Image (cartoon, helix red, strand yellow):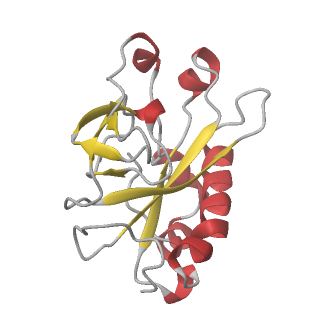
Amino acid sequence: MPARRSLTRLLVIGAAVAVALPLTGCSALGSLLSAPEPERDETTQEIIEGGEADVFALRVGDCLTMQEDAEVEAVPVVPCSEPHNDEVYFDFQLDDGEFPGDEAITTAAEDGCLAEFESFVGLPYESSSLDIGWYLPTADSWEFRDDRVVSCTIFDPAGEVTGSLAGAAY
């Protein structure tokens, strides 16, 4: 899961640490072993039962509990009506081509996730008490799974929330 980082801390820490603390989506092992798809409502596609889900099965609107590992194959998901730490609020594709490196992917994630923060929360990132993280492709998932997706997550540093943070405006 994404490490917990704020924009302020990113600016202070600098690019060297951004490489040392990559927020990764999966590893080569994930291409061989994968967790099941989460159980979803047929109409809304919302997760209706908690459990482990393949990181590649995450969708915008999914709620999950915190992951601190640098590389993950599966994540614990829950219905958003239950207490959770993170919510996927946006995802986007990176351009095809050679793996651009951890630093370039982290920069793209920061830019892409921050650009969509205000439209999701209802406040600019700088005015909000909420924070963001992300799941990123690794070199292995880029090469072996054709993984180009960045999944942006939002969380409240004060603790777990119940329900979506969409329109939270705090």
Q: Along the horizontal axis of the image, is 138 left or right of 5?
A: right
Residue at x 71%, y 41% (from the top left corner): 94
Q: Quadrant of the N terminus?
A: top left
Foreground residue among 19 and 170: 170
Q: For residue 85, which quarter of the picture?
A: bottom left
Residue at x 67%, y 62% (from the top left corner): 111
Residue 170 pos. (x, y %): 42, 86
Foreground residue among 69 and 157: 157
Residue at x 26%, y 51% (from the top left corner): 65
Residue 146 pos. (x, y %): 64, 22
Foreground residue among 78 and 39: 39
- Above-or-below relation of 146 to 115: above
Q: Along the horizontal axis of the image, is 156 left or right of 17?
A: left
- Above-or-below relation of 137 to 68: above
Q: Residue furthest front?
A: 43
Residue 96 pos. (x, y %): 78, 30
Residue at x 59%, y 15% (from the top left corner): 144
